[in-house]
Image: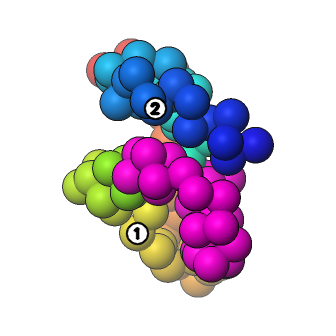
Amino acid sequence: FCKILEEPLRQHDYLCSDHLTIADIAMTPLMRQLHRCDTQLLATFNTPLLIKWLLRITETPSFRHIMQKQIYWQPDHTPILINFDNQE
């Protein structure tokens, strides 16, 4: 599977084009988990462009911001209210 993902990266910066698409967003969690769990296994696939792609995405400020650990809400915390009817 990693070899399949490596192929388009020979021609593009991202999986489907030269800019980030939903394909990249969808594949990042899977590849990030593989990279975090078994870096040595991923290295045996000989997919340097895939690793470069993964690091390009996961090292962005946006990705790091999204992945920050949050405090789990507890019943004694102030409620978090979201108004989905407000279009602002």
Task: State which mark lies toward you, 2 or 1.
Answer: 2
Callout 2 touching callout 1 (CB < 8 Å): no
As drawn, the label of residue 9 is: 2
- Indicate whether 80 appears above or below 9: below
Q: Residue at x 58, y 68 (%)?
A: 43
Q: Position of residue 48 (x, y in %)?
A: 46, 54
Above or below, comparing residue 21 to residue 64 in the picture = above
Disc ID at residue 2: none
Q: Which residues are magenta?
A: 29-54
Q: Main secondary structure of the magenta part?
A: helix
Rendered location of residue 60, percent (x, y): 27, 53
Q: Is residue 38 magenta?
A: yes
Q: Quadrant of the N terminus?
A: top right
**Label 2 to label 1, Cα distance in Å?**
28 Å
The kind of residue on which mark 2 rests is Leu
> Could one spot residue 86 in this view of the protein?
no
Q: Earlier in the sequence, mark 2 or mark 1?
A: 2
Mark 1, Cα crowd under 10 Å, few <14 / some 14-19 / many 20+, is few
Q: Quadrant of residue 32?
A: bottom right
Q: Is residue 71 left or right of residue 60?
A: right
Q: Residues within 10 Å of mark 2 (few under 14, many from 20)?
A: many
Which residue is label 1 attached to?
68
Which element carries disc 2, helix, strand or loop? Answer: helix
